[in-house]
Image: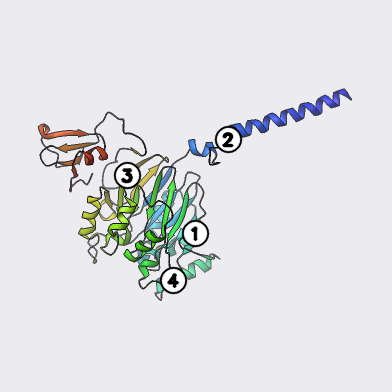
Amino acid sequence: MAQRRFLVTTILLICCLALIGCVTGIGADQQGNPVSQINELGQLTVSFIDVGQGDSILIQTSLGQSMLIDGGERNQGEKLVEYLQKQGIDQIDVMVGTHPHSDHIGGLIAVLENFQVEKIYLPKVTHSSSTFKDLLTAIKNQGLKINTAQAGAAIPIEGVDASFIAPVRDRYDSLNNYSAVVKLVYGNISFLFCGDAEEESEQDILSSSRGDLKCQVLKVGHHGSSTSTSDPFLNAVKPQYAIIMCGAGNDYGHPHQEIIEKLKQAGATIYRSDENGNIVFSSDGNSLKVENEKASTMPDKGFNQADTGEDSYYIGNKNSKKFHRLECESLPAEHNQVNLKSRAEALEAGYSPCSICQP
């Protein structure tokens, strides 16, 4: 009897120690978030895929899930499928068609025909085009139910906090303003993907938003058209990087020069798919790294922390008060150079970005 009692006591003690070990190993912060998730964030990758005059953005989370926002024109479908396959994608967990224009949804048809898609979101608006009708057919063939993309709806993708902040209203005169606008947060880093949302939608976002619109990376609305990126919206977003997706020599004149100048004045580093090709950001939740097909890799940039590195990231011109990337072809003579360790330091010292290398 004594042996049996000893055995039961021993088993209970082992179970208690195991439970304590599990709780201690995970832990939680003051908001109840598992410490392991905070301290051991993996790598998030956001690819702005060059699909000509159109949008396509692939998000790959640290937990192995993927989200695709838009797919360019239908003739970009094969190129898009090939890109996804090269990234090791075997299924799309979340697909978003921001609005029914063909330069955003056309390539999604090929993706639906070549990959398993778990969830798809579209704004509640239709279009009479054959491209939109074919998209609906491809969705039906996969047996998918269309989820409504609307402000306030959370996006179920593991490893990030993602939600729609537009469209806010049910009725707009322009299809562009039905655009599904996505806010994505990963640790201390955030992205804002604006589709073709124009000033009217931007005003609605500003009026209705309960959260902070600031982000490190902004996918500029409507391919850099002057119909988007209004001053109040840009002032609220305050991006450090601005991504413009457009085709070389497009018929619309995108991006419009006034938007380029506006983004430069706001201190944003500009990348363009027509000039830089595929633009890929990676982040550990505290810093950002960006690579593109037609330029060298930028140095890592940490946020919410002081820049303590000894290396100079930029070169300032004492005479012109412009600052440049290290590889810029317009660097000043050595006696006119000043070393600047961060973009913030350059701007605070009164230097403005070089228009050639766009630091």
The residue indicated by pointer 4 is 125
The numbered dot on residue 26 is: 2
Q: Nearer the viewer, mark 3 or mark 1?
A: 1
Residue 284: percent from left, percent from top:
42, 40
Residue lying farthest right? Answer: 1
The answer to whether the residues at label 2 and label 1 have Cβ atoms under 8 Å apart is no
Amino acid type, label 3: Glu
Disc 4, SS: loop
The one of 234 and 20 positioned closer to us in this rendering: 234
Q: Is residue 244 among the parts visible in the rendering?
A: no
Mark 2 vs mark 1, CA separation in Å: 29 Å
Going 27% across and 59% down the picture, which residue do you hit?
A: 224
Side of 133 relative to 256 (left or right): right
The tag earlier along the polypeptide, 3 or 1, is: 1
Mark 3 vs mark 1, CA separation in Å: 31 Å
The numbered dot on residue 21 is: none
Amino acid type, label 1: Ala
Question: Which quarter of the image is occupied by the N terminus?
Answer: top right
Q: Is residue 258 among the parts visible in the rendering?
A: yes
Disc 2, SS: helix
The numbered dot on residue 153 is: 1
The one of 220 and 42 positioned closer to us in this rendering: 220
Amino acid type, label 2: Ile
Question: Can you say whether 99 is above or below 281 in the image?
Answer: below
Question: Can you say whether 320 is above or below 273 in the image?
Answer: above
Question: Which quarter of the image is occupied by the C terminus?
Answer: top left
The answer to whether the residues at label 3 and label 1 have Cβ atoms under 8 Å apart is no
The residue indicated by pointer 3 is 291
Going 45% across and 68% down the picture, which residue do you hit?
A: 135
